[in-house]
Amino acid sequence: MGHPRGLSGGLLAVVALVMGMLVGGCGGARLIGTEQEIELGRQAGEKFERTNGGLDRDPRRVSLADEIGRRVGAVAGAPPYVAYPYEFRVLANDQVNANAFPGGLIYLWRGLYDQLGYDRDQLAWVAGHEAAHVARQHGVRRIERALGYELIIELLLGKDSQREIAGAVAGLTLQSYSRDQEYEADRIGLEFSHAAGYDPTAALAVLQAFRKIQGKDPSQLELLFETHPGNTARENALKAHLQRKGWSGRYYRPSG
Ligand SMILES: [Zn+2]
């Protein structure tokens, strides 16, 4: 970020975004409207995609992402959630990861497939976890909080801050979520994968698989390790939710 040459598209997006904020921000709590959110997320996502390996075209991985994405996306985009145009893509990157952009663009990284043995149920929970970040608007709210009215006014006054704001918007979409947001995404991820017809207990297998690579290169992992809650605590929270729901499966059978 910060190379002036490539920023004109991003800058236009920011200007559009700010106009949208001023139009839509007076009456409600939300500063960024759904249209802007989708457009902003798409621009940030595609920029990210270009600089992180591009798209993976492997038919097996792509068809799995399509199938899981269609089913999880249908659930995540149903009431009470916003009907975002969910799209699941495979990133040609061998790191074990997944990430989501506001508005519904979600990347399952190539390395994730090997790590999870191409297991549908496990991939579905990861997809559900990422879709939950979108559905609960964790990313876009962070952008709203970070930009705030001061920066918007500065931008409108035409100071030299445009470039920093454009960079900030792109960067903000890649930052870590809070612990609470991660727990919420874990829990809603269970609900999405269950409602989409997958075994929600596979979430526990995902945590175990990630535990194996913990320590090797934790900096790679947006999904589970960086500022995410500790693994045991997450596992317990997942089990508690499965227990509450009475959902059992291949990897967990609630007692009582
Ligand atoms: Zn997450």
Image: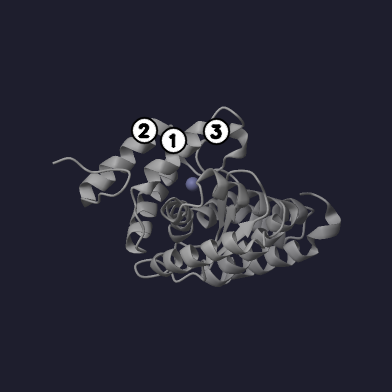
Image coords of residue 34 (percent x, y): 52, 69
Q: Is residue 247 above or below residue 115?
A: below
Q: Nearer the viewer, residue 222 or 63?
A: 63
Question: Which residue in the structure is indicated by mark 1?
Answer: 229
Amino acid residing under circle 1: Pro
Q: At 36% across and 33% down in the image, what residue appears?
A: 233
Q: Is residue 116 left or right of residue 189?
A: right
Alpha carbon separation for disc pair 1 and 2: 7 Å
Question: Which residue in the structure is indicated by mark 2?
Answer: 233
Residue 128 in view: yes
Image coords of residue 81 (percent x, y): 39, 66
Label 3 environment density (alpha carbons within 10 Å; few <14, some 14–19, many ≥20): few
Q: At 66% across and 69% down in the image, what residue appears?
A: 16
Amino acid residing under circle 3: Ile
Question: Which residue in the structure is indicated by mark 3?
Answer: 213
Q: At 74% across and 62% down in the image, what residue appears?
A: 11
Q: Nearer the viewer, residue 199 or 158?
A: 199
Work out which residue is located at the far top of the displayed protein and give it. 215
**Mark 2, secondary structure of its residue:** helix
